[in-house]
Amino acid sequence: MKGRLPLAPRHDEIDGVEARFGMPRRQFLQFCAGITAMLGLAPSAAGAVAKALLQARRPSVIWLHFQECTGCTESLLRAEHPTLEKLILDVISLDYHETLMAAAGHQAEAARRAAMAANKGKYILVVEGAIPTGARGNFCKIGGQTAIDLIQDCAPHAAAVVAIGSCASWGGMPSTAPNPTGASSVAEILGRPVLNIPGCPPNPYNFLTTVVHYLVLGKLPELDDKGRPKFAYGRLIHENCERRAHFDAGRFALEFGDEGHRLGWCLYKLGCKGPETYANCPSILFGDVGCGSWPVGAGHPCIGCVEKGVGFTKPIHALAELLTVTPPTQFARPAEEQGQGGTLATVGTVAAIGGLAIGAGARIARNLGKLPDEPPPDAGEAKR
Ligand code: FSX
Ligand code: SF4
Ligand code: F3S
């Protein structure tokens, strides 16, 4: 089905949806409409999304760890809905992950080889962490193989290679000057582009939405010239920031704790790298705790952790390059309550992944119920 949307499901295919996903058929179709919007598809593609989710392929995923802090995995584990466990059980088959698997030593290595052999050409290879190239790669060895050898073993037979986190995407923190280990990105080791999901750590929903795109459309999302999904890294943080109106009005915090800082003014003069960093942090937020849960929202300048040449490269309090000075035509609201546990966007992703996930049904339905063309929530919903 690569590149082509499947047809909408037949009535009899949807009939079992309540038993399978624990939600009425109408809610399921609402979920699919939300997912379709998240993926940037035309509303008419919602039927195709429904069909793809019902078919529920579970691609094998092999997840390698190298030079990093395991924050990428931790951020997925802290994604409240769905939890990584649900992601594993419902949508992907996580066949090798050193942090999470029970197996160890030779058993673990055997599990990786078995998964690769059984899913040759079909598995998704996810790499977390940079790859040390100094000392002939000997700074990082797992099961007797260097990180370089492991990547070169696993990548050729993968359907897709995903570099998760800034370390794997472009070297990240381990590559900070003077980069004593020669920390390099996955793309540099393979000598070809891969799909990058940078961030230190990356927002878990950007990974989850990428997986959903792959499941629904049978291909990876459209990428920018740095290999990043455009749905997540297509706009400057500065264009979506809730403090942008202060920037344009010339109202800046000049010191941590000064009046401007306490009043929530722009952090540009404290070194905020939002004007030269492309990411959706202000839109999808972190940790599912609602309004303000992103670095700038918490009062700290963005350090450009996702952006090669900015994060871990420029001094944190150096002024950012202004890639655009044109004010946006619409400003983000200075503060926006996001409801209990996530934006509509994140909820759309939740629907996509775990449609599926126990307990997500009511929450997603409630949020989709806020769409303008939906009927008002019933009394039971309104009380929640
Ligand atoms: Fe850590 Fe991942 Fe940063 Fe790197 O995230 S959060 S050091 S991007 O590879 O574990
Ligand atoms: Fe927001 Fe930073 Fe831009 Fe100021 S400089 S508007 S704090 S992104
Ligand atoms: Fe990183 Fe800046 Fe987003 S520091 S998490 S890119 S706001």
Image (tube, rainbow, N blue to C red):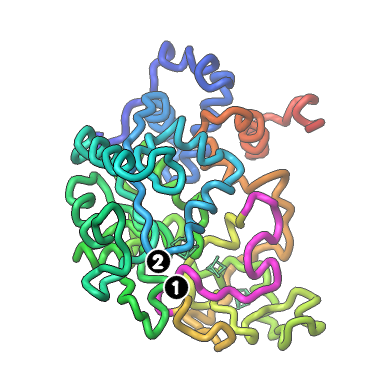
Disc 2 packing (10 Å; few <14; some 14–19; many ≥20)? many
**In this picture, residue 255 sits left or right of residue 81:** right
Q: Quadrant of residue 82?
A: top right
Residue at left 28%, top 52%? 143
Query: Within the displayed image, which quadrant is ligand 3 positioned in?
Result: bottom right
In the rendered view, does 84 fall on the left or right side of 332? Answer: left
Residue 241 image position (x, y, % from top left):
62, 68
Mark 1 Cβ inside 8 Å of ligand 1: yes
Tag 1 near tag 2, CB within 8 Å? yes
Seen from the viewer's position, the closer of residues 82 and 140 is 140
Residue closest to the eye, 214 or 73:
73
Q: Amino acid at mark 1?
A: Met
Q: Is residue 251 among what the camera can see?
A: no
Q: Residues within 10 Å of mark 1 (few under 14, many from 20)?
A: many
Q: Which mark is residue 113?
A: none
Q: State the quadrant of the N terminus.
A: top left
Read off the residue under disc 2: 167
Predominant SS along the magenta part: loop
Q: Residue at x 58, y 68 (%)?
A: 329
Q: Secondary structure at mark 1?
A: helix
Residue tagged 1: 173
Which amino acid lies under the numbered mark 2 shown in the image of this protein? Cys
Taking 273 as reference, is 167 left or right?
Answer: left
Quarter of the figure that contains the C terminus: top right
- Measuring from the top left, give residue 114's x and y in whole percent: 24, 35
Give the residue at x 48% y 56%.
72
Measure the alpha-carbon separation of dots 1 and 2: 6 Å
| Residues shaded magenta | 287-309
